Image (cartoon, grey):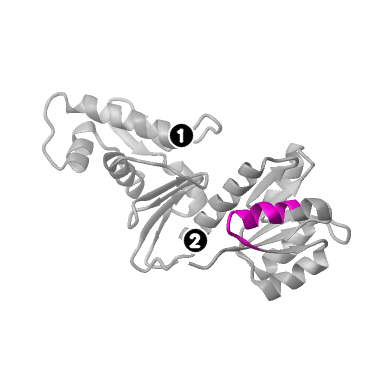
Amino acid sequence: MNAKKILVVDDEKNINDIIVSFLEKEGFETCSALNGKEALRLLDTENPDLILLDVLLPDINGVALCVEIRNKRSKTPILFLSCKDQEMDKIIALSVGGDDYITKPFLPGELIARVKAHLRRFDVMKADTSDEEIYTAPGLLLNVSTRETYVDDSPINLTAKEFDLLHLFIKNPRRIYNTAQIFEYAWKTNSIMGDEKTVMVYVSTLRKKIENNKCSRKYIISVRGLGYKFNHQLLKETEGGKETGGK
């Protein structure tokens, strides 16, 4: 498998060299630029798989450069690097097309982990989906064909039953399922008295894995007296949430 190529854009040469060193130790190919003009040239000649972009450059603001890059490449992941840590700086950078915002100084491990996470998600999204069934919601990706689940770009290890439950909920997001229906779908057998507690435990465990405390997103909601369903309100941001047989 060919190594992924990362374009590093930072005008501070010592920082640029350090980042390149981190990446190459992890097996990535790299190319680097100290200004926006050189970055645009390398964008065309090197065809990078991901871009690390400093916000403060000598010839063009990194945010403006991101807009130019997006006009050329609509999907290549762009991760901003900046010493500016105000919320508004992050909002602006992400709103113009940035995929992540990493504040300096950062730990090498964090940088590498985020690079790998974005590359992994990009590979999933650009893969030929002619025979795949993929569901998405804000912060969540479920690939039924490969049995993979990602939350905020990080892989989540679900058991077979947990994956089946999530698949059931997200593929019919407006439908409410009672515990007997859920049990029969996931366990492939008729439900008997007591199985509702089993379902409740599995749903609780699934929620803990896909709903973290860092955000207010709730993917699975309880409907009192009826059962469980997917929070279909989240899918308004992804036009229904399903990608199958192409886009």
Q: Viewer-nearest of labels 2 and 1?
A: 2
Q: Indicate the position of residue 74 as horizontal and vertical percent values.
A: 62, 65
Give the quadrant of residue 218. top left
| Element on which disc 1 rests | loop
**Residue depicted at 23% across the width and 24% down the height:** 197
**Residue depicted at 35% across the width and 62% down the height:** 132
Amino acid type of the residue that numbered disc 1 sits on in the rendered structure:
Glu
Magenta span: chief secondary structure: helix
Q: CA distance from mark 2 to mark 1?
A: 24 Å
Categorize mark 1 by other alpha carbons within 10 Å: few (<14), some (14-19), many (20+). Answer: some
Q: Indicate the position of residue 242 as horizontal and vertical percent values.
A: 40, 56
Q: Which residue is mark 2?
A: 123
- Residue 218, magenta (yes or no): no
Please give the range of residues in magenta: 18-29
Q: Residue furthest right?
A: 58
For the residue pair 156 and 243, the one nearer the viewer reads as 156
**Residue depicted at 49% across the width and 48% down the height:** 236
Categorize mark 2 by other alpha carbons within 10 Å: few (<14), some (14-19), many (20+). Answer: few
For the residue pair 92 and 121, the one nearer the viewer reads as 121
The answer to whether 51 is drawn above or below residue 233 in the figure is: below
Amino acid type of the residue that numbered disc 2 sits on in the rendered structure:
Asp
Q: Indicate the position of residue 96 as horizontal and vertical percent values.
A: 70, 55
- Is mark 2 in CB contact (under 8 Å) with mark 1? no
Q: Indicate the position of residue 1 as horizontal and vertical percent values.
A: 48, 67
Numbered badge on residue 211 = 1
| Element on which disc 2 rests | helix
Q: Which label's residue is closer to the chain start, 2 or 1?
A: 2
Q: Residue furthest front?
A: 25
Could you tell whether 67 is left or right of 114 in the image? right
Q: Quadrant of the C terminus?
A: bottom left
